[in-house]
Image (cartoon, rainbow, N blue to C red):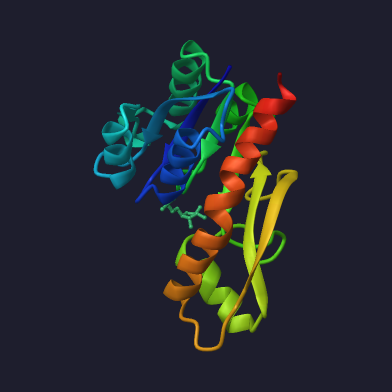
Amino acid sequence: MLKIAVMVSGGGTNLQAIIDAHKQGKLSGVTIDCVVSNKPDAYALKRAEENGITGVCIRPKDYEDKDAYGRFLAQYLSERGIGLVVLAGFLVVLPANFIEAFEGRIINIHPSLIPSFCGDGFYGLKVHEAALARGVKVTGATVHYVDAGTDTGPIILQKAVYVEDGDTPEVLQKRVMEQAEWIILPQAIKMIADSKR
Ligand code: GRF
């Protein structure tokens, strides 16, 4: 059984997609063990509570420095037997010591087709604003492993989405979420769970 921790900072629609996939029986061999947020008011924590999933707020500012935060996070998740950490709209830069502790066991969903529109400063709406400014006709989403860089780890899955005339960043963001993110993130989790059987 692969126990996953989902790390969030906001609305949690990707978390909801994982929860829904699990309810639909698409994530056999996976347990959503806990949801960890750096924001006490993240709606994602409410989604966890509504679905009987342990939700905790672990804030970097409560630790003397990033290393202490990373050490606690690694210890907490290790003690819960977490086999895969899923970053789903998690906006904190993970400390190097945490990434080392969970090397090869952290994945992230990014709302573009990496290597386009990724890296430092490319998150949330900014990604879609850049895609529209460049005039790309196709964008999409990427699930990748997390390494020491920003959006630089090995790519696991990608899904393309057409940009449509008149798209605003908000409209494009919603289409990328609905048609790509919410589909490939549960798929990637299932692929990893199956590979560990
Ligand atoms: C998503 O667009 C995701 O691609 C990005 O942050 C956003 C999180 O949205 N990493 P939500 O919290 O899952 O609704």
Closest to the observer, 43 or 175 = 175
Q: Residue at x 58, y 45 (%)?
A: 185
Percent coordinates x, y for residue 114 in the rendering = 69, 59
Question: Image quadrant of residue 153?
Answer: top right
Using the image, determine if residue 61 lies above or below residue 170: above
Percent coordinates x, y for residue 34 in the rendering = 41, 26
Closest to the observer, 6 or 66 = 6
Q: Is residue 175 visible?
A: yes
Q: Is residue 118 visible?
A: no
Residue ranking furthest to the front? 24
Q: Residue at x 53, y 71 (%)?
A: 128
Horizontal arrangement in the rendering, residue 163 relative to residue 78 (left or right): right
Horizontal arrangement in the rendering, residue 16 relative to residue 183 (left or right): left
Using the image, determine if residue 119 lies above or below residue 169: above
Using the image, determine if residue 34 lies above or below residue 59: above
Quadrant where the N terminus sits is top right
Percent coordinates x, y for residue 13 in the rendering = 41, 50
Residue ranking furthest to the bottom? 166
Quadrant where the C terminus sits is top right
Percent coordinates x, y for residue 132 in the rendering = 57, 80
Q: Residue at x 61, y 22 (%)?
A: 101
Q: Residue at x 61, y 35 (%)?
A: 189
Number of numbered tags placed on the structure image: 0
Using the image, determine if residue 27 lies above or below residue 10: above
